[in-house]
Image: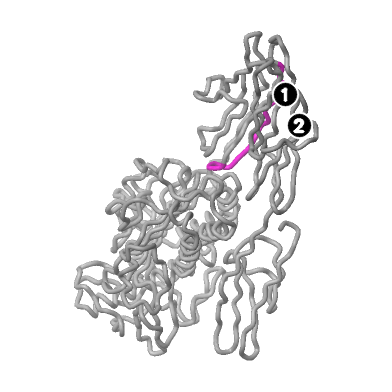
Amino acid sequence: MAGSNSVLSVVASGSSLTYQWYLAGAAINGATAATYTATDAGTYYVVVTSSDGSVTSANAVITVSSAPVITAQPSGATILTGTSQTLSVTADGLEMGYQWYKDGTAIDGATHPAYSASAAGSYTVAVTNTAGTVTSTAATIAVSSSVTAPAINVQPVAQTVNAGAGATLWVAANGVSLSYQWYRNDVAIAGATDRLYKITTTNANSAGDYKVVVTNTAGAATSTSVALKVNVISAGANTPAVVNAANAFLATLAADQKTVATSATSATTVLFDYALANANQWTNLPGARHGLRLNTTTLTAAQLAAANVVIAKALSATGITLLNELRAADQVLAGGMAAGGGAGAGGGGGGTGMPGTGTTPPDGTFTPPADGTGVPPAGTDPGAGAGGTGLALDYGADLYSIAFVGTPSATSPWILQIAGHHLAYNITYNTGKVSATPNFVGVEPPNWTVAADGTVTVTSNAASAGKAHAPMEKQRAAVYDLAEAIYADSSTSAAAKLTGTFTDVVMGASGNSDGNFKSLVYPTSGRGLQYSAMNAKQQSYVRTAIEAWVNTQASDVASTLLGAYLADDALANTYVGYGVGQNGVKADFSAYPNSVSSPLEAQRSYIRIDGPRVWIEFVVQQGIVYGTDVHYHTIWRDKTNDYGGSF
């Protein structure tokens, strides 16, 4: 409940223990004891460290329930004798109840957001949840035997919202048999014929000047005109820092490495014209990407260090670690291909440009794992892995690239792209505002270990000695918790189940690029289980899952996006849907390694979060190089702001 605290604690064994608590993946300043008093909602965990290593606790989800807030008051009216007026209230909050009153007395059975009043009197409604109660202003119903012209007594109010959030304009008027027509920029809005005008999902086209004309047979009244402003792209205070780092990187390059490319697929320069045909050059297929490869064959040590500073400025520590670990996973694939006799495995040599033991993190923003982020040495046998498939595909950490679509600037739009086989960070900067999508993340293998001698072991059935790696564990655990919470209730499980079979993400790249971007059509029906129909535990897991993707971005960008995605009105119109795996029973997002004897029974397990703006998918697929195991594909899109909403 708002205003109360929760004490979190952990018990661990070992000597000289130290503690660090985290909220939504970010370290909490000063939270370095075995207990922590939590006052904010979110997902908490603690990392306990000793001289022998560190261990991370399970997640603890704190939900803060606030008292309801009325956003649209009931409106009084004058009605003709023998007719009625529908009174309604709109409120934000969780699990709300309603009770209507006439002249201070509760009306039996009037326990819904709307009530049809036919008798003269003063009506109010109390809106209640576990955190408190709020009572509306009084709406007076007068009964008349004659018709008078309308009179507006409550005018609409100007608003500013983030794109994707909802907006509600309303008016209150006196008069009999009233009708309403809303206008935007003096043009009548089709179907907007109620005293409330609600936009479920705003975008750039929603902005404008709004008014309403109220009429009856005796005359008309026009409201004042009010502005609705829509913030289209997420604000980002770190834009100057990223621009400065990008220009510093450009200064280290030779002329031919920063000449504007004449081909969208050029791998000899970092610069591309600001155009969709250049921006959409990412895919989930293995192989090289456009731009300059992040390795010491393409770049000098100084150039590579400068490129890493750009990355460090643009991402959170979580996002940087994910990038490094996904590159490491691709290097494991290269080793698997080599061990299996696959041709053209790529990346088997050195020069990956990955930070290793003793490497100084770019600008001190992150610390690479002590074993060199799990990149196996050249030619390392993948140990207990299943071996390669013999496919002539290109894998390897050295095939990941950096590209600028547009010239880095604080006053004109450009896109920073960091991309490779299982990663596409597309971050658009536009005059101090930032968009972080489309964002593709995948991994094969989902986990592996690296022994002290560098031997890599890939397995889905047993833990092995050495440093464990599971790049997408935070995302996997988030969707696992969400799916299991939905399965625990047969009614929500049925409501969330989608029709069809899912072998990959639906809104991913098409072939060698995001060529279908302009023709993507998001579902408007059959979307699954609505957030408002979930219990508190399920709702908390929805929020945690969204955070798992968004918190890979710089903190100010993530904060702004989460403010839009997790706003009450946005969550109220968010859905979760799943598709069952090959097991035929449910979507299985269990952890690997585990005791599952047939891990491929989990393939085709699918789940998605579908909000007014946010779209996140996670699917389990059969492995390509390690064909007896699984691998993951995910996509995060913003329905209004992919590529900054510019194309």
| Quadrant housing the N terminus | bottom right
Pick the front one: 389 or 178: 178
Q: Residue at 65% of width from left, 19% of height from top?
A: 83
Pick the front one: 485 or 507: 485
Q: Residues within 10 Å of mark 2 (few under 14, many from 20)?
A: some
Pick the front one: 280 or 285: 285
Residue 21 x, y percent position in the rendering:
64, 72
Q: Is residue 157 left or right of residue 362?
A: right
Q: Is residue 434 left or right of residue 214?
A: left
Q: Residue at 71% of width from left, 71% of height from top?
A: 7
The region drawn magenta spans 151-165
Residue 324 x, y percent position in the rendering:
44, 70
Residue 286: which quarter of the image?
bottom left
Residue 501: which quarter of the image?
bottom left
| Amino acid type, callout 2 | Lys
Pick the front one: 372 or 92: 92
Q: Residue furthest front?
A: 108
CB-based contact (under 8 Å), mark 2 and mark 1: yes
Q: Residue at 68% of width from left, 30% of height from top?
A: 157
| Amino acid type, callout 1 | Ala
Q: Which mark is residue 102?
A: 2
Give the Cα distance between marks 2 and 1: 9 Å
88 in the magenta segment: no
Where is 422 relative to 184, above or below? below
Q: Earlier in the sequence, mark 2 or mark 1?
A: 2
Q: Which mark is residue 119?
A: 1
